[in-house]
Image (spheres, helix red, strand yellow):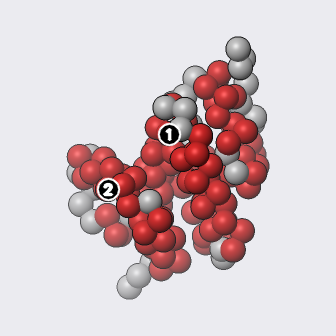
C-alpha cells in the first residue's frame, strides 16, 4: 500500500524541475543509509530544503527564488497532505544551519508562502544585513 501518493508526486515534480539538486539530495540520503528513497518523501523534501540552504549560503538568489517559488506553488495548489509536506518537510527545515545574519540577507529571496510557514514555526530571521 502506498501511504504517501501525493507527497511522492511532489517529489517527482521536484526531481524533474531540479535534477541536479535531486541527485545531490539522493546522494546525501544514501550516504546516511536511507535505502528506499521513494518510500520517504517527507525525509526527501527535508533534505531538498538543504539544497536551498546551500544556495542561500552561496548567495545564489536566483536558485533560492526558483526553489522556494516552486515549492510555494505546490503549497498553493496542493491538498492538505501536500500543504503539510511543504510546511513540515520544507519550510521548517529551510536555513536551519545558517547564521541569523545570513538568513536575514536571504529572506527577501524566499517565496512569500514559504516565509509565512517558516515564520509560524521559527519567527522571522533576526540579525544584521551590514
Residue occupying image coordinates x 64% and y 34%: 106
Residue 42 marker:
none
Q: Residues within 10 Å of mark 1 (few under 14, many from 20)?
A: some
Hey, which quadrant is residue 86 in on the image? bottom right
x 31%, y 64%: residue: 37
CB under 8 Å between discs 1 and 2: no
Position in image of residue 13 (x %, y %) = 48, 71
Q: Position of residue 55 (x, y in %)?
A: 50, 39
Mark 2 element type: helix
Residue at 23% over, 46% down: 31
Q: Position of residue 5 (x, y in %)?
A: 48, 79
Dot 1 corresponds to which residue? 55
Q: Position of residue 81 (x, y in %)?
A: 61, 72
Whether residue 93 is visible: no
Q: In the rendered image, which residue does mark 2 sit on?
A: 23
In the structure shown, which secondary structural element does the residue marked by tag 1 occupy? helix
Task: Determine crowd level at label 2: few under 14, some 14-19, many 20+ residues with C-alpha closer than 10 A.
Answer: few
Residue drawn at x 73%, y 55% is 113
Assign the C terminus to one quadrant of the image.
Answer: top right
Query: Viewed as shown, does residue 63 lie left or right of 74?
Result: left
Q: Quadrant of the N terminus?
A: bottom left
| Mark 1 and mark 2: Cα distance apart in space | 15 Å
Residue 27 vertical position relative to residue 11 in the rendered view, above or below = above
Amino acid at each position: 500500500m502506498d501511504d504517501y501518493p501525493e507527497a511522492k508526486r511532489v517529489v517527482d515534480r521536484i526531481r524533474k524541475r531540479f535534477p541536479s539538486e535531486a541527485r545531490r539530495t539522493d546522494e546525501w540520503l544514501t550516504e546516511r543509509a536511507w535505502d528506499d528513497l521513494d518510500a520517504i518523501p517527507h525525509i526527501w523534501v527535508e533534505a531538498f530544503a538543504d539544497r536551498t540552504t546551500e544556495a542561500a549560503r552561496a548567495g545564489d538568489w536566483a536558485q533560492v527564488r526558483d526553489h522556494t517559488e516552486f515549492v510555494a506553488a505546490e503549497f498553493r495548489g496542493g491538498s492538505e497532505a501536500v500543504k503539510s509536506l511543504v510546511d513540515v518537510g520544507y519550510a521548517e527545515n529551510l536555513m536551519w544551519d545558517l547564521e541569523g545574519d545570513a538568513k536575514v540577507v536571504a529572506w527577501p529571496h524566499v517565496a512569500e508562502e514559504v516565509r509565512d510557514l517558516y515564520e509560524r514555526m521559527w519567527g522571522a530571521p533576526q540579525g544584521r544585513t551590514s
